[in-house]
Amino acid sequence: MPEPSPDQTPEISPATSATTSAATSATTSATTGEVPAFGWSGYAERVNGRFAMVGFFAVLLIEALSGETFLRWSGLVP
């Protein structure tokens, strides 16, 4: 596959026509060129995954510091 010349930029095709109109008037994410969107979008799934990783790490930290399981620490299991 030939390398593109520096003056050529790749075309970015939007996923849906709804994001096309939003992309022209909305600001993009700070880390990517994507427009933040709700629902089943790649941006929303990435944010959900990051929050899940933080929550999982918090549970591990609670268990390590307290010496008990999270369910026993939170009072869900006697």
Image (tube, rainbow, N blue to C red):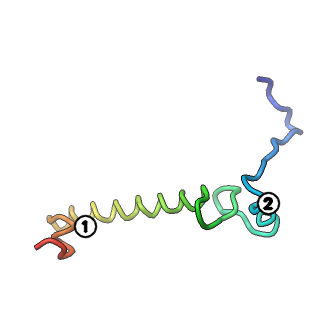
Q: Amino acid at mark 1?
A: Ile
Using the image, tell me which numbered label, if any, was put on residue 20: 2
Badge 1: residue crowd in 10 Å (few <14, some 14–19, many ≥20): some
Which residue lies under the disc numbered 1?
Answer: 62
Residue 14 image point, x, y percent = 76, 53
Look at the numbered disc 1 and give the secondary structure of its residue.
helix
Quadrant assignment, res 23:
bottom right
Residue at image x 32%, y 65%?
A: 58
Residue at image x 21%, y 63%?
A: 63
Q: Is residue 73 left or right of residue 51?
A: left
Using the image, tell me which numbered label, if any, was put on residue 54: none
Residue at image x 63%, y 58%?
A: 31
Quadrant assignment, res 37:
bottom right
Quadrant for the N terminus in the image: top right
Q: Amino acid at mark 2?
A: Thr
Quadrant assignment, res 62:
bottom left
Residue 50 image point, x, y percent = 47, 59
| Front tag of 1 and 2 | 2
Outermost residue to the bottom: 75
Quadrant for the C terminus in the image: bottom left
Look at the numbered disc 2 and give the secondary structure of its residue.
helix
Residue 38 image point, x, y percent = 61, 67
For marks 1 and 2, the one nearer the N-term is 2
Badge 2: residue crowd in 10 Å (few <14, some 14–19, many ≥20): some
Outermost residue to the right: 7
